[in-house]
Image: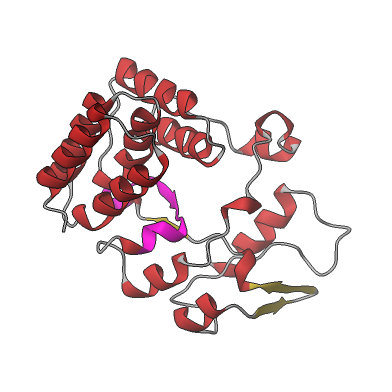
Amino acid sequence: MGDYPTSFALNTIYDTKPLRPSPYWFFAMSENLGTDAASLAEGGELTAKKYASTFVGNSRDSLIIVFEPEKNQCLWILRPEDAAYRGLPEAIKQAAQVSNLSRIKDQHETYPALYRAIVPENPASWCFHYQRADLARQMGDWEQVVFFWNLAQQGGYAPGHGFEYIPFIQGYAHLGNWKQALALTKQSNRVSANMKTILCPVWEELNTIISQSAEWDSAFDEANKILGCQ
């Protein structure tokens, strides 16, 4: 629908009518952002006005999203770490550096009534499982991440893009299932191009936070070999 209809929808769903200026706004980077990605990453004020509605916010409170279902992708809420992925447009990679996932709260049971009425969940899809797992990753609930992978497998759902394997690779690694983490890494690298540019940093990050062991060292070395990490 475009920028300001989407902005009005967000504020209506979250029942922000008494609040002025509006607390949410949708900016399309190619259309109405009004600043370049580099300036966004540096941090600064974002403003918008349409009819009687106004918005004033800071770029560091942004959530950077990518949604291209025509490419068989789910909606991605990017993390700053995702800026390493070469498959993203350069402007999106720069903007991802300010994506502030702390703005997202796990309040599934207290969604506004209007949201529940017009956005029914569809568990019969891969994206349902991916997005619930992605939220669980944000909360550090690795058992829940793996739960949604298993649930998707039972339903016959699978990622259409290599990027969407990443939460599950991390989930299995955190739970010590190196074999499955490596298997998903291979699948991810095979499904989509340029995946080594994000998978190598993912494994490097895991190497800094997972307790060292002979089994982990072996898995880490094999992942580097599979991906050709430097």
> Residue 112 placed where, x, y %?
74, 38
Q: Does the magenta stretch include residue 79?
A: yes
26 in relation to 210, above or below: below
> Residue 73 placed where, x, y %?
32, 47
Q: Nearer the viewer, residue 177 or 31?
A: 177
Q: Left or right: where does residue 10 sit relative to residue 153?
A: right
31 in relation to 78, above or below: below
Q: Which residue is drawn at 11% across and 43% down?
A: 226
Q: Which of 97 and 11 is in front in this view?
A: 97
> Residue 160 placed where, x, y %?
25, 40
18 in relation to 143, above or below: below
Q: Residue at x 29, y 60 (%)?
A: 85
> Residue 22 placed where, x, y %?
77, 65
Can you see residue 32?
no
Q: Residue at x 74, y 53 (%)?
A: 12
> Which image quarter: residue 21?
bottom right
Colour scheme in the image? secondary structure
Q: Which residue is drawn at 74% across and 48% down?
A: 14
Q: Nearer the viewer, residue 14 or 184?
A: 184
Can you see residue 26?
yes
Count all numbered tags in the image, as a single digit: 0
Residue span colored magenta: 70-83
Q: Does the magenta stretch include residue 230?
A: no
Q: Left or right: where does residue 30 sit relative to residue 15?
A: left
Q: Left or right: where does residue 126 sit relative to residue 11?
A: left
